[in-house]
Amino acid sequence: MIKTDKSILQSLDSISSGVLNGENYSREDFARSILNYPAMMVPSVQEPIIQSLSKTIKGEIALLDPFMGASNTLVTGMKYGLSVYGQDINPLSLLLSKVKTSHFLFEELDEANKRILDLIRADNSSKVEVNFANIDKWFKKDVQIEISKIYRAILTESSLKIRRFFWVTLAEVIRMNSNDRTSTFKLHMRPIDEINNRNTSVVKNFESTSKRSIKSITDFSSVLNDSGFIKDGKYSKNVDVVWANTKKEIKTNRLFNLLVTSPPYGDNQTTVTYGQFSYLLLQWIPLEDIDKNIGFDYLRSTQAIDTESLGGNKNIEDTQTDDVLFGKSETLKKFVTQFDGSQRKNAGKVTKFINDLDLSIDNMLVKLQKDSYMVWTIGNRNVNKKVVKNDTILNELMQSKGVNLFTDLERDILSKRMPGRNNFSDTMSKERILIFKKPY
Ligand SMILES: C[S@@+](CC[C@H](N)C(=O)[O-])C[C@H]1O[C@@H](n2cnc3c(N)ncnc32)[C@H](O)[C@@H]1O
């Protein structure tokens, strides 16, 4: 039975804050632990909402996440048998999403793992397989040698799907074994003493990580299988993840009737440096195993991915004037015009970010059918010690495009890993979930 707007509202509003805050979820759910990507969404937010909305949409549901990140939203959609499409500008997100949306059998991964470990153990070479600026700063020599052994062993696997799984495993191992601190997403060296005294065995770490990740990913495959969503060894609905810049396009010909996403909350440099986080990991993963169609040289510097992302400095040619943007969002105008001088310049970063977000929304709207729901999880941040009300600004941008708020929910994010807390406002301890309905 198709529900009415009123009953949908009731079921959305009755989702308890305990559920939204993740009381029923462990880190292992939905293969979330295979790579600790920044600012991952917890399925507790999307799952009850997707569940509720999926009962209201006629026919097949096609879900879009234009900022897929660790693809937790897509994977949650798959649990409900939806067709899913996601894109992201970060090649690491794409690799991770390709792995998480693929179907794996325990035996195929377990056998490959044994082959890989045998090769690593028999490998006496001290050749280092990659080279890049400052490699010795970021990796101790013995770590470089051990990573190279794993690298060579993964390359011998003939199946691309299997290799991708192990590249993700290696990425998680590199994250833990480089000289970069794991406490922030910005590239930042551990203290020298700590580096010298660290006694890590990269291979041992790879062994335990691959074991855990194989369990995690195949547990999720079993969930899909038990629900009857696996046919001929594959997910039976459409599933597609792509490298693309959402500010420029949604890179598919498909149309959607549900959008669930969580955008960045500001430019990467001053919020979450997804690019810097990915830089060292991507150095060790062959581009051709991720996707040959990635449209920029993401390894040219530690900043490359972040400047290409929303609010970054690239592509200023499609910048709307302040007046145009202020016309769309009074809250943005009030925020920016309260400052002068250098603070005003700093606030310009917010305008730039909102410009990019606004263009991204236009790209999404053309791919969404009439009456589609859009579920946005968004939080606020601080600039010049004042709160940027991203939630209100998003709502105003939507209104300027004739899209009205359907309802909204709130959740705590105290447990979420957040870098440089001073960049985030106190209200960052809450995230809002804004649900819109597209009337045309
Ligand atoms: C908060 S994360 C998304 C979390 C994700 N929904 C999940 O479930 O894990 C935001 C993502 O937006 C991506 N991003 C930033 N700018 C982008 C752009 N211009 N085009 C596509 N993706 C972008 C970042 O790389 C990052 O992965």
Image (cartoon, rainbow, N blue to C red):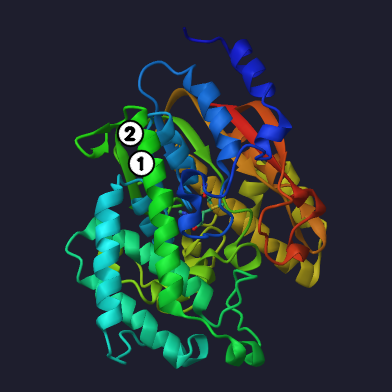
Q: Residue at x 31, y 92 (%)?
A: 126
Q: CA distance from mark 1 to mark 2?
A: 6 Å
Q: Residue furthest left?
A: 158
Q: Position of residue 414 (x, y in %)?
A: 74, 51
Count every numbered label the image shows and give the total: 2
| On screen, residue 336 above or below 147 | above
**Mark 1 Cα-neighbour bin, 10 Å: few <14, some 14–19, many ≥20:** many
Residue at 39% over, 62% down: 210
Mark drawn on residue 221: 1
Most extreme residue toward the top is 1
Mark number for residue 225? 2
Nearer to me, 187 or 342: 187
| Quarter residue 220 falls in | top left
**What percent of the width, then of the height, locates residue 241?**
35, 48
Q: Secondary structure at mark 1?
A: helix
Amino acid on which the number 1 mark rests in the picture: Ser
Decide: is 139 above or below 328. Answer: below
